[in-house]
Amino acid sequence: MSAIPACIPMTRLPPTRVRIAAAGLDLLSSTRVKVACSLLMAERLEIELAEWDNTPVAALIAHDAQLAGRSAIAAAERQGLPLLVISRQRGIGATARLSHGATVREIADALRQTLQQSAASPARTVNDGGVRLPPLLERLRLDRPHRAPVLLENGLLRVVVDTHNGMLHMLRRMPLEQLLDSAAESSWYATELALAEWETRYRPDVTVSYVIESLWWQLAARGQCALPGHAEGAIGLSAWPDLDPATADPQWLLVLAHLQQRTWLPGALSTATGMPLDAVRRVMSVLRFSGLSVDEVGAARARSRVQAPSPAQARSFLRVAKRFGMKLLGMQHG
Amino acid sequence: MDNYSNKLVFVGNMGAGKSTAIRAISDIEPVSTDMPISSEIEAGDDKTLTTVALDYSTVELDGGELLHVYGVPGQRYLDFMWPMVCEGAMGIVVLVNACEGVAVDGVAELLVEFGRLAPDASFVVGVTRTDLAPGFELLRFRDGLKARGFTVPVLKVDARQTLQVEFLVKALLSCQHAGAQLQGAPAR
């Protein structure tokens, strides 16, 4: 028996059986998806269509007009699951999208492409940091390349996140407290916006805008972005954050002051400051997410460099620190 | 025994909140050289007195030791006082009033000058009255200082609130501690 030469392209795929979940599909879309799956049988791609219930599937196809679809999309995005979205809204970005009313052929082509891409990039399930944040927090990250404005919705809260300009815009008059309280919820639904759509359709509705960098530290003060284990690499501080003295933990100051001088690994910094490792990692995570971390700290720092203190000065300094409620390690106590 | 290097210095222009901040953390009523504000000078609020020379106060530490707290005007024509109060200071707090149209260059000049006078000191910049200056952008101000080479804590502060002024002092002490510790740390 002769082997098939490697240079001859295969015209037929080997039989493949996959399970795909569907969520939020209206009758028209549901019917067309089923017919599209039948079409793909001719290409030896056997698709079992199941309801979205979080059991393992190869991909999700969902319509974003209904809450069930939006929730499933948000969950799939968190899990890094291959995703095909049917939407009445025009979208941009990495997620595969079909317009509402897409033909059977268009659905079949998109499904095939989604499954092929999924097979080609199995690492999509884990992001580069090894940790995936809840949808709103993920979109607020300033340590990633800037993306197009994103509309995020969660119940009555509607915001547009513009990481390029570092701003979060509220589209309804809602208290900031409510946004901060719900920031870590998984029920946020994201829709990427074309720039023109943002400018003409959403910007006129902006009620108030917030600086994303400052929001990160307000979230940190509420324990909303506690991600121990994320910040493992050595980082330093590029600029001091806008800390609110009324809510920020004064212990952060010692961590930030050390990171200002040079890069630290979390373990070494925990030892140097006497702060619990989880707390140090949390500050370092927020520093990273808020775009204030650097991998190297330049040699020319401000005038916070000091001479080595004499023992008498060190004792006095510790007394001053104690008077202001600070417990410091690393210097001889008097 | 008292250690006269136990000094904190607050510096800033008229209306920056030096006297108020010092009063907020002091154990005693500060000694101030207040004078009525000239009618030709726009104070911007109900302020009727201003410190023309310096403020002085103390904070008592364990063992009866004292932390000496000074407030000095940031205006150049009063700079003859700066070397006297800065000698041996462990920290300098630069206060600026957000309502006054904060000039980055002016603050950078103060940092340079006081850094020269107190080379062992750590620095922090406190911005007062930000609640009355909606157009003030702290991050832009901070980035302006950074662009001029100053990566120092820049924090909003209500000079009337003890906890907030103490937060500023803690930031300064944290910088001092981190810098002091680094001098003895082995190279990595």
Image: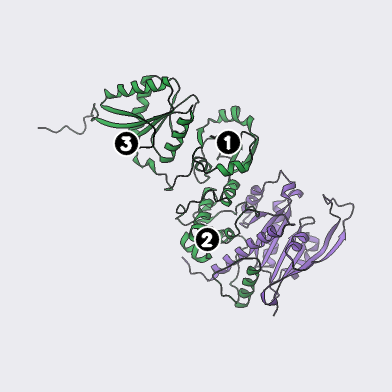
Q: Is residue A121 left or right of residue A280?
A: left
Mark 1 and mark 2 residues within 8 Å of each other at the beta carbon: no
In what quadrant of the picture does the N terminus of chain B appear? Answer: bottom right
Marks 1 and 2 share the same chain: yes
Let me know if residue A10 appears in the view. Answer: yes
Identify residue type, mark 1: Val
Q: Residues within 10 Å of mark 2 (few under 14, many from 20)?
A: many
Residue B76 screen position, x and y as percent: 78, 60
Position above or below: A85 against A276: above
Residue A59 screen position, x and y as percent: 36, 33
* Colour used to depict chain A in the structure image: green
* Mark positioned earlier in the residue sequence (1 or 2): 1
**Chain letter for the purple colouring in the rendering:** B
For label 3, the residue is A119
Identify the disc placed on residue A262: 2
Residue at the far bottom: name it.
Answer: B1
Residue A150 screen position, x and y as percent: 53, 35
Residue at 28% across, 28% down: A45
Identify the disc placed on residue A159: 1
Q: Chain of mark 2?
A: A
* Mark positioned earlier in the residue sequence (3 or 1): 3
Identify residue type, mark 3: Ala
